[in-house]
Image (cartoon, rainbow, N blue to C red):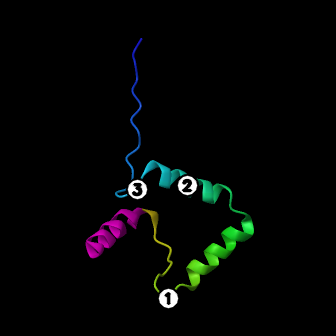
Amino acid sequence: MKKTTHKRPKLPKGWTRKQIDDLAKHYENQSEDEAAAEDDAAYRSTRLTMMAVPVDLVPQVQKLIARKAG
């Protein structure tokens, strides 16, 4: 019988497992009204913009953002 090993997913830089678990719990326990209010606030932000990006361009956009942020 072949023994399989399960690798833990790589965490985002600077994040702990507890932070990820806490964030997941926040969204899992959020009401629909709370989620809608959070979405509305994000769209009203003057520091961010929301846009639709064709799926096939997402990797290129991510690379561009990473270059500009770095």
Q: Which residue position is annotated with label 1? A: 46
Rounded to the nearest whole Å, what is the CA distance between mark 1 and mark 3?
Answer: 26 Å
- Distance between mark 3 and mark 2 Cα atoms: 11 Å
Sequence-earlier tag: 2 or 1: 2
Q: Give neighbour class at mark 3: few <14, some 14-19, many 20+ (Cα, 10 Å).
A: few
| Quadrant of residue 29 within the rendered picture | bottom right
> Between disc 3 and disc 2, whose residue precedes?
3
Label 2, label 1: how many angstroms apart (C-alpha)?
A: 27 Å
**In the rendering, at what x and y percent does residue 55 appear?**
45, 63
User: Residue at (68%, 72%) from the top-left corner?
Assistant: 36
Q: Which amino acid does label 1 sit on?
A: Thr
Q: Mark 2 points at which residue?
A: 22
Q: Quadrant of the C terminus?
A: bottom left
Disc 3 marks which amino acid?
A: Trp
- Asked whether, in this view, residue 35 is left or right of residue 63, the answer is right
Answer above or below: position of 56 versus 17: below
Tag 2 secondary structure = helix
> Which residue is found at the position 35% from the left and 66% from the top?
62
Which residue is depicted at the point 39% across and 15% down? 2
The nearer-to-camera label among 2 and 1 is: 2
Give the x, y percent position of residue 16. Answer: 42, 52
- Above or below 4: residue 30: below
Q: How many labels does the image show?
A: 3
Check disc 3 and report the residue beneath it: 15
As drawn, 35 above or below 42? above
Q: Do the residues labelled 3 and 2 touch (CB within 8 Å)?
A: no
